[in-house]
Image: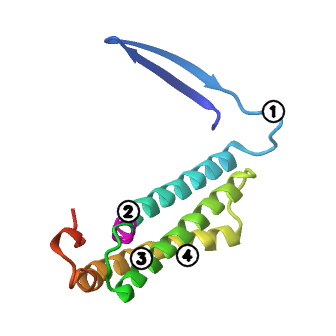
Amino acid sequence: MIPGLYKARLSYDGKVIEQTFRVKNDPRLDVSINVQKEWHASLLKIGKLYEAVIDGMLSAQQMGWHLNKLDREKVSYNEDAAKAIHQLNDRYGELLSRVRSLYYESSGWIGPWTGDQKAQFDYYYSMLPKLANETQQIIKNTIPQLNRGLKREFRYTLD
């Protein structure tokens, strides 16, 4: 937590209690407050990227879950169409893992990003629109192939 003045607020039973408190700098740290703020901001930036990956991968996961349901119910479907969905889920999973690793690596020491960490972040960030586009292409082109020949109750539909 960055040193500074904070306010805690507790609400219960229609009552609100507030108290201001100060967080002091850790005397063991030999790092300026500005560097600490930059480091904290970088961790928040990685956290937002992580959340964006989670949000982006939901559609891919739902398609994957649908394939799992078809497998459980022993329904035959177009394996080539399913392959694209599995690959998309694999790519999202890999991106999520790499972003998580970047967060843990960056949180392990207080300071600005290294050049490598900055390059990793930029690359991971650039993957989001590519995966989103791939997801839309699968919804547009692959899902109709998957649904072809399936009974209505087994077809994948967008909610």
First-in-chain label (3 vs 2): 2
First-in-chain label (2 vs 1): 1
First-in-chain label (2 vs 4): 2
Q: What range of the chain is rendered magenta?
A: 59-71
Kindly report which numbered mark, 2 or 4, lies closer to the viewer in this rendering: 2
Q: Which percent across, then down, holds residue 127?
A: 48, 76
Q: In which quarter of the image is the N terminus?
A: top right
Q: Is residue 144 left or right of residue 35?
A: left
Q: What element carries label 4?
A: helix
First-in-chain label (4 vs 3): 4
Q: Which percent across, then down, holds residue 14?
A: 31, 12
Q: What element carries label 3?
A: helix
Question: In the image, what residue occupies the spot 54% across and 65% down?
Answer: 96
Kindly report which numbered mark, 1 or 4, lies closer to the viewer in this rendering: 4
Kindly report which numbered mark, 1 or 3, lies closer to the viewer in this rendering: 3
Task: Give how far apart the Cα atoms at labels 4 and 3 are.
Answer: 12 Å
Pointer 3 residue:
131
Quarter of the image where one finds residue 65: bottom left
Pointer 1 residue:
27
Question: In the image, what residue occupies the spot 57% across and 27% down?
Answer: 5
Q: Which percent across, then down, holds residue 117?
A: 66, 67
What mark, if any, has residue 123 been given in the picture? Answer: 4
In this view, 154 is above or below 137? above
Pointer 2 residue:
58
Q: In this view, does 105 lie to the left or right of 9?
A: right
